[in-house]
Image (cartoon, rainbow, N blue to C red):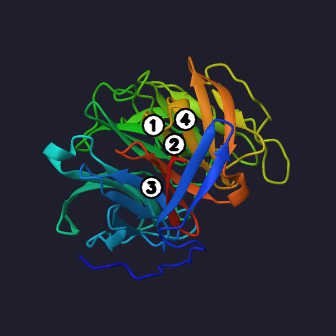
Amino acid sequence: MRLLPLVLAIVAHDSVGTTWIYDTPDGRVRVEVVATGLAAPVSLSFLPDGRLLIADRPVGVLSVLDLGTRTRTLIDSVPPVHGKVDGGLLEVLVSPDYARTRWIYLASAIEVPGGNTTVVERAHLVDGHLAGRERLFTARPVIPNSNEFGARLVLDQGFLYVSLGQRNLPENAQNLGSDLGKIIRLFEDGRVPRSNPLAHTRGARPEIWSYGHRNPVGLAFDPATGALWEHEHGPQGGDEINIIQRGRNYGWPVITYGVEYGGKPVGEGLTHHAGMEQPVFYFNPDIAPSGLMFYTGDWFAHWKGSMFIGALVGRCLDRLVVENGRVMHEERLFEDRHWKVRAVQQGPDGAIYMGVDGGMILRLTPG
C-alpha cells in the first residue's frame, strides 16, 4: 500500500490533529481534524476493524484512513471515473455482512460510447487494492452530459437500493423506461427481484422501486422504524426529504416547491397532483443537501435518533429531529465555518465523522 501525496487538489486550512470546541444549545462538541488533502470527500464507510474508507468524488480516489495513526493510504485498482461537473467516484459502501462476504460496493460516473452513465460495482479489498471486481448495474439511457448522476447506495435485508439523478433532463423522472430520476432495487449481486413493483409492467425498467425524483443524493434507513428516507436537490429552492415507498411517484417535474433558475415556474407551477407524493420536508431557499445518516450512538445522547444531512449551499451540518415520520425541529451546526459538508457518517466508536470540501475529514466527540 502506498501513501497518498500530501496534497491531491485543495490544501486544507487546518492540519491533522487540530482541535477546537464548538458550543451548541445541547452541549459542547469537540472537533478534530483527522485527515486533510482531499478534494471533495463525498462518501465515508467504515470497515469492521475501524478503518475508514473515503470516496473523493472528482478525482476518483478511494483511500483508507487508519484513525489510530491518522495515516491515509490509496487503494489501487479503482476503475477510472468521469469526473467532470457532478461526476466522479460517487459512493463507497462496506457491506454490513462484510465479515462473511468481504464485499465493498462503489457507485461511479463513467464514460461509455454515446456519453456518460452511473454504474454500481462491488469488489474485495485485498492488500490495498480492489480484487474480483464485478459490475452489478449500468444506468440506462446513456446521456451526453455530466450532470446529476446521483448516486447513493444502501444495503438492507439482502437488497441493494441505488438512487439515480435525472441527468439534467426532467422528462426522465416520469419515464418508466428510464432508470434516471429513480430509486432502484436490486439483489446484492445485481439481479432484479421479481417482486419489484414494475417488474411485470411492459416497457418499464424492472429495477425501479420509486420514481419522480430529481437528483437524490441522500439515502438511509431509519433503524428505529425501518423506513427508507431520501433527500434530493430541487431546482432553485424545493430541496426535498421523502420517505420512499414501493412503487410511489414523487412528482418531479410535475410538482415541486422550487422554481426554475431565473424565477419562472417549473411546468405549470404545481405543488400538488393526484397520485404524487408530498415531501415530508422541504428547504426553500435550498441548502443543496449531501449525505444522510441517523445517529444511533450513545456519545451524543441528546442527538440520538436525529437525522444528519450535509449542506453544500447551506454550508452547515443540518440536524433534524424526526418523530412519527415528520420533521419536528431543525438545527444548523457549524454555520460559522462555512464548510460545504459532503458526507456525514457515524463511526463504530459513536463519534460523528464529516467530509468537507477543502478537504478535510472531521471527527466530532463530546466536548
> Which numbered mark, 4 or 3, is in the foreground of this view?
4
Q: CA distance from mark 1 to mark 4?
A: 10 Å
Front in this rendered view, residue 112 or 366: 366
Q: Which mark is residue 292?
A: 2
Give the mark nearer the N terminus: 2 vs 4: 2
Residue 220 - label: 1
Task: Write down the quadrant of residue 124 in the picture.
Answer: bottom left
Three-letter code, disc 2:
Leu
Q: Name the residue that disc number 4 marks.
A: 307
Quadrant housing the N terminus: bottom left
What distance separates the C-alpha of mark 2 from that of mark 3? Answer: 10 Å
Q: Position of residue 65 (x, y in %)?
A: 35, 64
Q: Are marks 4 and 3 in contact (CB under 8 Å)?
A: no
The answer to whether marks 1 and 4 mark residues whose Cβ atoms lie closer than 8 Å is: yes
Label 4 element class: strand
Q: Earlier in the sequence, mark 1 or mark 4?
A: 1
Task: Measure the alpha-carbon separation of dots 1 and 2.
Answer: 6 Å
Tell me which label, 4 or 3, sits earlier in the chain: 3
Residue 32 lies, in percent from the top left, at 51, 60
Q: Where does residue 41 sit, x and y in percent of width and height?
A: 49, 62
How packed mark 3 is, by other alpha carbons closer than 10 Å (few <14, some 14-19, many 20 or more), is many
Name which of mark 3 and mark 1 comes first in the sequence.
3
Q: Please give the name of the residue rendered at 28% of the width and 28% of the height, measured from the top-left corner.
A: 194
Which numbered tag is attached to residue 43? 3
- Mark 2 packing: few (<14 Cα in 10 Å), some, or many (20+)? many
> Does residue 205 appear in the picture of this structure?
no
